[in-house]
Structures are given as C-alpha cells and as structure tokens.
Amino acid sequence: MARLNVILFGLGRMGQLYLRLFHTALAPHARILAVADPHTANLDRAAADYEIPHAFADPLDALRLPDADAVLIASPTSTHVQLIEAAADRGLPIFCEKPLALTREEHVAALHAVRRAGVPLQVGFMRRFDPAYRRAFELIAGGEIGKPILFKAVGRDPTCPPPRFADPRKSGGLILDMGIHDFDLARWLMGSEVERVSAEGGLLACPELAEVGDIDVAVVNLRFTDGAVGNVDVGRAAVYGYDIFTEVLGTEGSVRVGALRRAPLLHMTRRGAVRELVASFTERFAAAYEAQLVHFIECVRSGRCPEVGGEDALRAFEIGWAATRALDQGQPVRVSPAEIDTTL
Amino acid sequence: MARLNVILFGLGRMGQLYLRLFHTALAPHARILAVADPHTANLDRAAADYEIPHAFADPLDALRLPDADAVLIASPTSTHVQLIEAAADRGLPIFCEKPLALTREEHVAALHAVRRAGVPLQVGFMRRFDPAYRRAFELIAGGEIGKPILFKAVGRDPTCPPPRFADPRKSGGLILDMGIHDFDLARWLMGSEVERVSAEGGLLACPELAEVGDIDVAVVNLRFTDGAVGNVDVGRAAVYGYDIFTEVLGTEGSVRVGALRRAPLLHMTRRGAVRELVASFTERFAAAYEAQLVHFIECVRSGRCPEVGGEDALRAFEIGWAATRALDQGQPVRVSPAEIDTTL
Amino acid sequence: MARLNVILFGLGRMGQLYLRLFHTALAPHARILAVADPHTANLDRAAADYEIPHAFADPLDALRLPDADAVLIASPTSTHVQLIEAAADRGLPIFCEKPLALTREEHVAALHAVRRAGVPLQVGFMRRFDPAYRRAFELIAGGEIGKPILFKAVGRDPTCPPPRFADPRKSGGLILDMGIHDFDLARWLMGSEVERVSAEGGLLACPELAEVGDIDVAVVNLRFTDGAVGNVDVGRAAVYGYDIFTEVLGTEGSVRVGALRRAPLLHMTRRGAVRELVASFTERFAAAYEAQLVHFIECVRSGRCPEVGGEDALRAFEIGWAATRALDQGQPVRVSPAEIDTTL
Amino acid sequence: MARLNVILFGLGRMGQLYLRLFHTALAPHARILAVADPHTANLDRAAADYEIPHAFADPLDALRLPDADAVLIASPTSTHVQLIEAAADRGLPIFCEKPLALTREEHVAALHAVRRAGVPLQVGFMRRFDPAYRRAFELIAGGEIGKPILFKAVGRDPTCPPPRFADPRKSGGLILDMGIHDFDLARWLMGSEVERVSAEGGLLACPELAEVGDIDVAVVNLRFTDGAVGNVDVGRAAVYGYDIFTEVLGTEGSVRVGALRRAPLLHMTRRGAVRELVASFTERFAAAYEAQLVHFIECVRSGRCPEVGGEDALRAFEIGWAATRALDQGQPVRVSPAEIDTTL
C-alpha cells in the first residue's frame, strides 16, 4: 500500500519529534512530503537529517502540493486555527498539536471549519495512547473499579521554564499549559463532564516568572456533572523529575497510572536505595507520541474518526480556562460549554 | 522508678487499644490505676482481661483516687471538655483522644482550663509519632526539600461506617472526622498556617449515610499564610484498604509518606502480581499509638510539654470546620483562628 | 490466669531483647522469675531496668527455684545442650535460641534429653512467626503457587562482624551462622527435605576475618528429595542494609518475601528517589521475635507442641553443616540425617 | 549519507523482528537489500509487508549481490558458522543472533574466519544495550558499588516451550538456551571470567520436555577468577511472566536490574493491589533489540569494533556448556577457555 504523504507545519521541539517518528516508526506507513517553517535554519537542519521532498517558508505554499494526503500542525499555537482552516479548505485530514487554541472562539472556529469541510481532526492528547492509560481506561470501562467517584491528577515539570515560554499570552498560563492533558483525562476516564472548578495557586519556586505574570504551582478542585469530584495539582518545578500521576477511585476499587522510575534499576549503598527518575515528557510518553500518529494514519487511511478530536480539545480547554478564572477571582467558576453548530 | 498511675476514661474501641498498650508496651513505665465507663459490660470485660485496681461507672469517682498521676480520655467526644476541666481541677496531666471537641468554643474552654491549672495536655494526633512521619518532618526541617510549596494528602477508610458513627452531630462530618489528622499534618509539616479553604464533595458510595446527612468523599484545597497551597482528599469507602498518604513538595524535592502494603510479600500468578493491603488504622499506626503514649508518659515524668497539645487540636479543628462550611456554601472560607487567653 | 514464671539464661544481645519483650508485649501472660548470667554487670543492668525477683551467676542455681514454669535459653551456643538437659531433668518446657548446637551429636543429645523428659522444646527460628512468612506459608500450603519447584533465599548482614563473633568455632562459620534460618525456611516452605548441597564462597569484603578463618560470602545450591532445587546466598557485608529475601517458585506462581524499606517514606531530589533501608535483624523481625514467644507461652499453657522444635533445629543444622563441608571439599555433599531414637 | 544495504538471513521470529526494525527505527540509517530464507512463505510474507529489493531461497545467492554492505544472520543456529564464513569471505561486516553455535569448535572456526577476513562480528547479546543494564554497567565501572563480589541472576520464561524448540540438540539445553545471556552479563558486569561452575536441575513443570530429554529448572553456582562467586537460576515455566533479574553486589553497594511490571499501572480492589507483568522478551527488551542494531550500523559505518563480539559469544557459551556438563556429572566443572589464534 502506498505511503501517505504528510505535510508537517512547524519544526520546533514537537515538530522535530514528529519528523523523526515519520522517518522511523511510521516509515512503513507514511512519509513527510513537505515541511514548512518560517525559520530557514530549521528547514536546513531537517534537510540535513532526512530526505524531504519539499521545504517551504510559507505554510500556504506547502498546502498547494497536489499529492498531499494529510497535514500535521506543530507550529506555534497562535497559528493553529488559521492552518486548520486552510487545510480543511483543501479537504485534508488534520493532526494538530495541543492546545488547539487559547480562546474558546478560536476552538469553535476550528471545529466549524473541519465540520464544514468534513475532514477528520485529531488533537495531540497523546496520553490517551499511552499503554498504561489505555489499560486504565479499559479497566474502568470494564467496570473493574465500579462507578468512578474521585479523579486525582498530578502534573509536574522538573524545571522552571524560560519566562518567554511560560508567558500566559502564549501558553495560556500554568493551569492551562500543564493541566490540559489532565482535564482531558478527567473527562475520558471519568466518563463525565466537569461542571465547576475552584483553584488555589502561587508563584513560589520560579521567581523569574513574575515578569510574565505566571504562577508555578496550583491545585484545582473539580466537580463533575454526575456528582463525582476531583483534584489536579500542577507545578513547574518538581526538581526530582517529570511527574505525571493519575488516579480514578471508584466504588469497587482504584486505578493508578504513574511512572517515576527512569529504568528498572535500583542502586543501593550506605545512603539507602536510589532510583533515577523520569526527566521529561519525551521520555515518559515516547510510546504514546508514536501511537497517536499511528492512530491518525490509520484513521486517514480507513476514514474512521480519530478517538480524540476537536470537541475534546474544546472541552479540556474550557475546564482549564474556567480554573484559571477561578484562581483569579478566588471563587468557584462554572464550566459553561460553548455551543457547536452540529448542522454543519 | 515507680510506675505512673493512670486513670483511663472510656473503654470503647480506642479505650481498649490504650488499655492493651498500658499492659504491654507501657507496662514498665505506667499502669492503669482505674478505668471508668458507664457501661458495666465494658468494665467487666476489662477486668477479665487485665488486673485493674479500680473500676467506676462515673468518671468523677475515679478522679477522687488520691494516687492518680495522669488521665487518659478516650470516652465519647461530647464528654471530653468536661473531663478535661475536671482533671485539670485535680491538677492531673491529660491525654485526650482526638477530636478534643466539635466546636471552637469547647476547644477554647478546654485550653483555658488546662492553662489555668498549669497541667500538660496532649491530643491524640498519633501520626506525628509514626516513624515515617517523624522522619519526613526531620527531612523537611533539615532543609532536605528546600522551602515547602505544596501539601498533598489522601485519607481513606476501606468501608462505609454505620450511619450512627458517621452522624455529623457526633463525628463533625466527613471532612472533620477523616481530615483532622491531615490538617494537623499540614500545619506541622509545612510550618505554616492554613488561611483559606475550599471544597467539593458528595455522597457517592455509601447511600445509607443519607439518613444522617453526611457525605462520603471530598476534596479540600488549602491556602497557607506563606503562599503555599495544598489539597486533601478524604473518603469513606476505598474498598481496597486503609489509605493514608501525605506529600510535601518543596523547592528542592519532595517527601512522601504512604503505606499500602500489608506485608513485604508479593504473590505472582498468571493474573499478575498481587500485594495485600493495609486494612485499618490500628494496623497502619500500631507503632504510632504506642509511641504517642510513651511520649505522654515521658512528658508527665519530666515535666516537659507534649509535642502536640491543645492549640494544635484547635487549629486543626478550625481548618476542618472551615472546609465543612466551604463545602456547604460553595465558596472559599477564611480560617479565622480563635483567640486564646495567653495571660492564664 | 496466673502469669507463667520464666527463667532466662543469658543476658547478651538476644537475652536483653527477650527480657524487654517479657516486660512489655508478654507482660500480661508471663514474667521473668529469674535471670542467670555469669557476668555481674549484665545482672546489674537487668535489675536496674526491670524488677526481677531473682538473679544468679550460676544457671543451675536458677533451676532450683521451685515455682519456675519454663526456661528461655539465650546464653552462648556452647552452653545450650547442657542447659537443655538440666531443664529437661527439671521437667521444664524449653525455648532455646538458635543454633541449638554446633555438632550433630549435641543436637541429638538435646533431642533425646527432651524426649526422655517429655518436655516441649521450641527453637528460635523466629522467621516462621513473621507475618509475611506465615502468609507465604499459607499461600503455598493452600496451593496458590501449585507445586513448589525452586527455593531462593538471600541472607545478608550490613557490616563485617568482629572476628571473635565470626570465629567458626563459635559461630559454625558463615554458611551455618547466616544460612540456618534460610535452611529452615527451605524445609518449611518447600515441604521437602534437602538431600544434596554444593557451594562456592570466599573472603572478599571483610579481610579481618582471615584471622579466624571465616569467609564472608557464599552461594549454596540445594537439591530436595522431591527433585526441586534451590539456591541460598549469604553474606556478611551488604553495606546497604540487612537484606533477607525468600522466594518459592511453583508451577502456578511465585511467592516472595523481602523487606528492604525501613519506612513507607520516599525522598525525591535532583539525585533521584531515595528510600532508607532496614539496618538490622531486630528491626526487620521485631514482630517475629515477639510472636515466637507468644507461641511458646501458649504451647506451655496448653500443652501443645511448638510449631518449630528440636528436630527442625537438627535438620537445618545438617544442611548448613553439609554445605560448609561442600565448600571445603569443592564437591557436592549429601545431607545424611542423623537418626533420632523415637522410642524415647 | 547513503543508507547501508543489509542482507538479512532468516525470517523466523527473530528475523521478523529485525526486519521490522530496519523498516522503522533503523530506516534513516540502513535498509534491507535482500532477505534469504528457504521457506517461500516467509519470503512472501516479508514482501507483502515491506518493499524489499531482493529475495532468495539460497543465502549464498544473496551474498553475490554486489552492493551489500553488511549481513545480519537470524537463521537457525546450525547455519550460523557457515554463513559467517561465507560473509567473511565476501568481506562483509556480520551481525549474528545468539548463540553463535552449539560447540566450542564451531565458535572458534567462526572467530578465526572473521579474524582472517578482518571483518567485524557482533553477536546478539542485546541485554548489553538495554538502558537499565548499560546504566548498571556505568555505575559498576564508575566504582559506585566498590569491588564486585557476588553476581546473581534470574532468567525465566513464562511458558513451557514446544519440545521441538527445547530439543537440546537445537537449543543446547536449558542452561545454555536460557542462561547464555546471564553468563555474558556475568563476565561483562563483574569484569572477571568464570572459572568453575556447578549445577542442580530437574524437570518439574513441563513434563512434555521429557521426550527431548531437557530439564526445565536449574540453579548454577559460579566461581570467578578473582574469587568472586555467583548464582544463576533459569526456568522454563514461571507462569506469572517473563522474569529477568540481575544483581551485582559489591563491597560498597549493590545494583539490581529487573523489570516485572508491564506498565506503570496499579489496580487495587478488595483482593489487593494488582500489577500486570511483562510477558515476553520482545516486550522487555524492545529498546535493546533496536539499540544493538543501531550500534552495529554505527560500527560498520565508522569502522569501530562492536562492543560485544565473537570472543564474548565463545566465553559465554563455554560457561553454559560447562554448567550443562556439571549438572550431568553431579560435579563442579572447570571452565577451560578455548585458544584463539591471535596471529590471524
């Protein structure tokens, strides 16, 4: 079967990661037909590493290639919606890195564009493709913990980011930036929507973030429409490692997903037993990043709808956005879901 | 050195536990001089198990014994303050099981009584004497995790309690009943006071508690006076076991205390690897219950002040009380500390 | 019920441990009527710590006390058999610390003495009373791992002992001294006798033991009469802690017992996740030491036969003795069980 | 840089695995120029899955391709040496799956052939490329555990193999088949050669293997030339999973490598806490299989010598062969290293 031709937008950190995956794990199934990035250095580097038929500074030029089968958007968040709309106009299936956008309006615009064009849209909530999270979902869906009543999540990065990356105008702020995966997992694993949030937070470990007005630690309480409750804590500076932990407690048991150990290795000395810890999201979720692209390619080939799409992106965003406002206001905030025009 | 003569009030579950400890671990240092309990059956049972010089239905009769050195109050919460006042009048050092009382006024009355009499008062926050928690405190106090910025706690019982035990008029309600130890740990380990709380909760696993108006699961966000934040989740029905977990995240690391495994035993079959889990607070905190009494006896002997006293009881209560109101009101609530007359 | 009067022989490390247990955990059930130790300092220290009715330099004097109900032998190994014979003559139930003796002949003499006198003899294989090992036994006996086919054990002390303690003339040598508990567990958990052993070993970590001619590490292969196989490794100097691990692999699964973590506490920093480890046998087996004495007292009271007796001591000794010879000879050695006169 | 052209011999289980790796992880660096397998069905299946320029029933035909850069031998063990010799004659770098051969003579013949031809030979001891084992090696080499004194290893498959696979004439018998990786790790991690072995073993779980005369469980004691000791247990039927564990104990600590958990997921119910376990070598060592080929390709490109070569294969084989004889003879057996002609 012929390999799918994919256009990749953006050659930043995530773009590089996807580029490598297309030349390794995905090589039998798809290939990068073109890359588009305004920075010539990025294009040169990609060309040095891999044979890529086309390279463009302007993404819209790439979209004119007649033999493109799909697009993968890994450019800055601010460009996502415009690229989604342009790709949808071309009738191309779209994979877009998270977050889809930083406003509700943009999310809705993107959703309407793909609905109008009838093209599939997958969003980069890669955790849903992590083997442990998939197994957790199966156990919960199979009734192995009874009715879910409590959702807990921890999401912590090991180092303070540079202020320019953590600038809330680009990142959406700590709660959205770090928590959006957790809010997506909350909806997926609990099988219920979040209807109210409240939050506490502060700037305690990364003083340099004061200049962009962000915080570095927060706790967010969740209330689900079915009465279940939850809590998510997110933080920028857990110096020990990249710590992602999720629990769903049900009436018949609990499922926990959390990977802290870097390797199945224990070093014991007079000072005790030491384990080295996972340091980054690329280390923790290497298999998930690969699996989400495999899923996307399969969906494109088969015409199936991706398991995690634009509406999931919107709903997770809305939770994070409400939690951010709840923190600002010192009050619980209702999550009011935007309406999507389902007649499109 | 002569053994201390202790009067024990109350022979319910906790009273029985303390009675056994005085006849085993504490035997070299102290003895139960008298037990007092209105239920004759309890007195008979105690007499059958151990040689106890005196037994009374009326606690005030016990207080008349001239050679008493200290009292241990394990009777129902509603009787605590009256007994504290009576023992203080007699000039006797007091150990009182938690909670001290169910109102702020009663806490203050008890504190004033012991201050007036100049007697030591220790409150049954036994977790502070658990070896793992003590080590956690040492690590934090020794700067091993830098400045604490986030407090996390889980407190879950394995079974729905009978409605009469969970009746909020007797227990203070889920958040106070289950969370008071966590609120005490929060203050102790973080080295800062809680100034604001918010909560979500519901009745999801123990429908029979509807008759007494309690809930069975809650998440409580905390804000500390130094800007740190926290979250505590408490629940009645974690069917897998008795799950007490605490974490303090600091700018230089994290300390976690949590004991789920019943024994250092792993059973592996075709179905996977199975560990049996801790089932009860007496199993998890057996060493702590013993150590807190050893501490009390040492304080009585040496005239030192117990490490955890009446003001700790008051402050932990106030957090739980505020969280309970926060849940009722659907709003964050400030924790406003009651004033204690320090001139007494 | 009146408390049992026990005579304690020996106030070394183990004697002190048992003395404390009789004044704490065992206080409701038994008391130390007399202690006997040739060292006046030991007697004085015991008298300072506890009220003990009688103290003797000569153990035979203690045996003359008319109201003694049982004896506990914790004196040096070389004195065990003589004291067992004397106590048996007096018709007293006997608890004897391991090893019973350092020769097969002495073991048999002790067994014959207690059989002749018809008194119960329990040997200090306390691991059989550890909650995790008991649960392992139950799982195996209940068929939860099918037919046992492989026995694995690790037995490691954290520090090189002083040469005088490790002197093979007193200790029996590394394999017997460290491995005798493992050989007892092998028989108990596998439900089969060891019929052949082979060994490798050396002096690699504790050069000072060369002066007494001992080694500090060894691996011992076992062959059981039912065809199952096994391996035990023992070592003097696992600097990270006191490491006791046991596995039984069966046709339907595996059971593993091993406790390395000192406390349910995790400390995570930039250097990784650190756990402090168990440092000594008294820490690891505190509950087991207590439980074995409770068992002995119950057996004395009820006339039941102790679960672990003189023949168990003999059989475990024979395995260790054979393994020691196997190492010396560089050849597998058959374990030939001594005959016991069952007509006594 | 042009991709290396590799000829792949053998499309059995391992050949399929390598074929997939060349079309995914290794795609940027190398490609399969030709496959050779006597079974047409295997060739057809490979052609259906991947675009492969050439396919041959006869491996010698493949070797005639002028643009081949290297060969990868994954055909049955009995064909290895002949193919090594033929590839060496062609001057091609060789990767050969383990074991290289089932006799010492064949090993030596293969070594002499590659030495004569001056071509690199890498052997498929993939564990050396597993991230955890590499880290263990670094820690040991860096002195983090002092001087190694004890080597421990567990190697267990989860299911009884079909008798035809376990036939000792094809597999070398249990100890060689399962233990060869452990013997290689022993040499590599201990930094010392094995000079003497002894063994016990039996057929206890897989009665159907009686027909080919193999056993299913064994324990092997090791003695190293520097005086260190060791033990390896290997088994066919650990029903709970694929269990590979290795420890090196040194004078200053211990390093342990062992991965039993399939995923970082914990499922807790009334029955306890359950973890699913690793089921196969492809699951456990997926990263290692990839990394060893990356290493081979790098060596071919750079002219460097592979880290694990023919002499390693010979030495590991000799240990396993000696252990197999030790079991047969019921005696310790010296490992006598074959001489290699170093003048070639």
Image: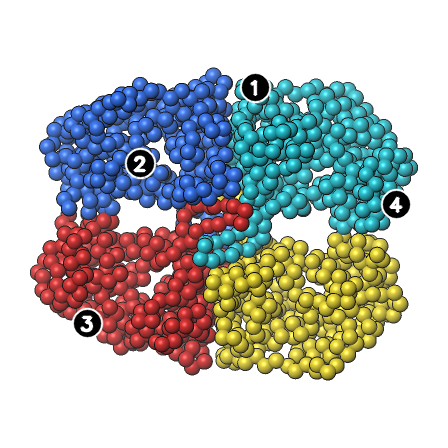
Chain colours: A yellow, B red, C blue, D cyan
Look at label 2 and name its amino acid: Glu
Q: Which mark is residue B82?
A: 3
Label 3 neighbourhood size at 10 Å, few (<14), some (14-19), many (20+)?
A: some
| Real-space CA distance between mark 3 and mark 4, rounded to the nearest whole angstrom | 93 Å
| Real-space CA distance between mark 4 and mark 1, rounded to the nearest whole angstrom | 51 Å
Using the image, determine if residue B214 lies above or below residue B149: below
For the residue labelled by badge 2, is the local secondary structure a helix, a strand or a loop? loop
Q: Tell if the residue under mark 2 belongs to the same chain as the one under mark 4.
A: no
Residues at circles 4 and 1 in contact by the CB criterion of under 8 Å: no
For the C terminus of chain A, which image quadrant? bottom right
Snapshot quadrant of residue D136:
top right
- Between residue D179 and residue D171, name the one nearer to us: D171
Q: Tell if the residue under mark 3 belongs to the same chain as the one under mark 1.
A: no
| Real-space CA distance between mark 3 and mark 2, rounded to the nearest whole angstrom | 51 Å
Q: Residue C93: where, in percent of width, then height?
A: 21, 32
Q: Which mark is residue C307?
A: 2
Question: Badge 1 is on which residue?
Answer: D329
Q: Which mark is residue B231?
A: none
Name the residue at 15% across, 27% down.
C90
In front of the other: label 4 or label 1? Answer: 1
Q: Tell if the residue under mark 3 belongs to the same chain as the one under mark 4.
A: no
Question: Badge 4 is on which residue?
Answer: D53
Circle 3 marks a residue in which chain?
B
In front of the other: label 3 or label 1? Answer: 1
Q: Tell if the residue under mark 4 belongs to the same chain as the one under mark 1.
A: yes
Circle 1 marks a residue in which chain?
D
